[in-house]
Amino acid sequence: MATLPIIQIRKGYFKTKITSLRLKSTGVTSFGDELQSIIDDLIETLEKSKIAVGLSAPQVGILLRISLINLDLERKKPTIVLINPKIISLSGKKDKKKESCLSVPGYRGEVERRYKLEIEAKDRFSKSQKIKTEGFLARVIQHEIDHLDGILYIDRMKDPNKLEPVDFF
Ligand code: CO
């Protein structure tokens, strides 16, 4: 297992498109040993972070459709692994909350997203799972699936000038 370096985009470079953070990732088709070690390393990278609630493979330069979620910063709950996640439905009210991202260090900004979602994804052993959720978890899943399509939260801000500096990175 290894902790992987996170690819970061800094202010002044937010419109740069040629970085793995801006590319569309490819679906996972092989669930063998190599995928298992990538997932182990992603889990370690996420769980060692004191602030991250999600991590997606393109953030470490691997352009595969893999997203991880762990809302428990004490890491007492297992990390959820989503392979090839697909949004089945987005519903509920439009909800505005501040988001931040390990790949955009030093900032946070308000993003409007739908409050409820339903997704379908595979787990690390290729078993299909459906997740229906709302609120913060629904937001984090949307943020992570965006990473698989090369979209960062700063792209979804109504006013990108309203990015706020924060010191928790
Ligand atoms: Co992010």
Image (cartoon, grey):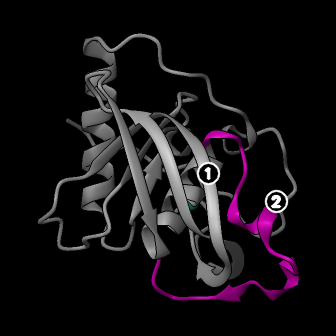
Which residue is tagged 2? Answer: 13
Tell me residue 157's x, y (percent). Answer: 80, 74
The type of residue carrying mark 1 is Ser
Q: Where is residue 108, by image quadrant?
A: bottom right
Q: Is residue 3 visible?
A: no
Tell me residue 60's x, y (percent). Answer: 50, 41
Does 150 sit above or below residue 36?
below
Tell me residue 81's x, y (percent). Answer: 33, 42
Which residue is tagged 1? Answer: 89
The type of residue carrying mark 2 is Tyr
Horizontal placement of 138 versus 130: left or right?
A: right
Mark nearer the N terminus (2 vs 1): 2
Residue 148 shows which numbered tag? none
The residue positioned 15% from the left and 62% from the top of the image is 77
* Secondary element type, mark 1: strand
Image-quarter location of ligand 1: bottom right
Horizontal placement of 96 versus 32: left or right?
A: right
The residue positioned 65% from the left and 50% from the top of the image is 146
Q: Which residues are magenta?
A: 148-169
Judging depth in this view, the residue of 167 and 111 nearest the camera is: 111
Horizontal placement of 72 versus 35: left or right?
A: left
